[in-house]
Amino acid sequence: MQTRLQAIARQRSIRLMVLLPVVVAASLAAGCGDKSKSEGKASQAAARVNGDEITVHQINQLLERQPGLKPEQAEAASRQALEGLIDQQLAVAKAEEQKIDRDPQVVALLDSTRRSILARAYLEKASAAGAGTPTSDEVRKYFDAKPALFSQRKVYALQEFTVPATPEQTSATIEKLKATKNPNEFVEVLKNSGLKFSAQQTTQAAEGLPLGILEQLAKVNDGEALFVTAKDGFKAVLVVASKSQPVTFDQAKPAIEQYLTVERRREFAQKELKNLRAAAKIEYIGKFAEKAASGAAAATASAPDTIAQPAPASAPAAEPAASTGLDAAALNKGLSGLK
């Protein structure tokens, strides 16, 4: 009997996991939909599904989540978004028909989603209003402090080797690799070491690399390698070739301004949460009362990253060697080593 009940519970849980995103979307859309009706349906209809309208406003909301979208891609992306909304509406209707939106687990998830959205919206609004924007001096200072990313920017042709090894093997092998004169000799030494390794080739502009790696790689000559060791082996990044492609201050300025603005808002959100905690009466109960202070400090330090900080957009897919400047998305990727 217990096994049968457990099986039924698992099936029910799987069904909920599949349909929960649909019901969440239905609930959030319903709140917006009621408001639209009361305002005279200001949004233009893009389609009707069994009498229920899907609006251009809904499509635009989805497109806003794709910040790297190019103008020539907008039409195709709009149609794709509409088809997705149609599928969603069909599933939403079935979920409501089966009263899934009344399931206790779904109700709890809807409330959790609502609270998360409200918390994020407040912190984003507060940080946008209170964080301010970086000054020209701050932007210039940042540019000057990161020559490998800007004034001395390069595009690198790299070979990356991942080598599992003991500490003794790592030390001996790296010593031999450092004595090599060219990439072919480097690979031969690895092959003759008897160690198994994986390798991949890549071409990366400076902004495509974590800053911690970039600043070290900028000091490595062509034909030499950067080594990163660990307990279970090492990684070697061999610079096969590099090409200088500096970025001027004027080219980098917009991306730096946007990056520093995001950082300001993240820091502001952290301070705001600390201020809210200081002004509130918070009581930890039961097992949560143990080590409450240290847990609260850690939670506050990480909360803005999960609540308020916007996720960086994906770097453009253009060939790095063809790039003549930076955008904020690429800069965020290049500075990921700071976070």
Image (cartoon, rainbow, N blue to C red):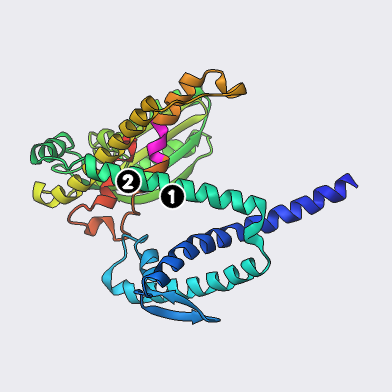
Q: Residue at x 29, y 42 (%)?
A: 126
First in sequence: mark 2 or mark 1?
1
**Vertical comparison of 82 with 6: above or below:** below
Q: Is residue 325 left or right of residue 120?
A: left
Specify the quadrant of the image occupied by residue 309: top left
Where are the magenta residues, as a range?
301-305
Magenta part, dominant SS:
helix
Q: Is residue 69 left or right of residue 147?
A: right
CB within 8 Å, label 2 to label 1: no
- The answer, for residue 225, to whether it is visible in the render is no
Specify the quadrant of the image occupied by residue 271: top left
Q: Which residue is mark 1?
A: 117
Q: Is residue 166 magenta?
A: no
Q: Which mark is residue 124?
A: 2
Q: Is residue 11 left or right of residue 175?
A: right
Residue furthest front as drawn: 38
Q: Residue at x 12, y 35 (%)?
A: 141
Give residue 69's position: percent from left, percent from top: 31, 65
Give residue 35's position: percent from left, percent from top: 41, 66
Residue situated in front as seen by the camera: 241 or 338: 338
Q: Residues within 10 Å of mark 2 (few under 14, many from 20)?
A: many
Amino acid carrying mark 2 in the image: Glu
Give residue 254's position: percent from left, percent from top: 16, 51
Residue situated in front as seen by the camera: 43 or 144: 43
Amino acid carrying mark 1 in the image: Ile
Label 2's element? helix
Specify the quadrant of the image occupied by residue 222: top left
**Vertical comparison of 38 with 328: above or below:** below
Q: How far is the residue under mark 2 from the one under mark 1?
A: 10 Å
Q: Residue at x 53, y 34 (%)?
A: 194
Label 1's element? helix
The quarter of the rendered structure image containing the C terminus is top left
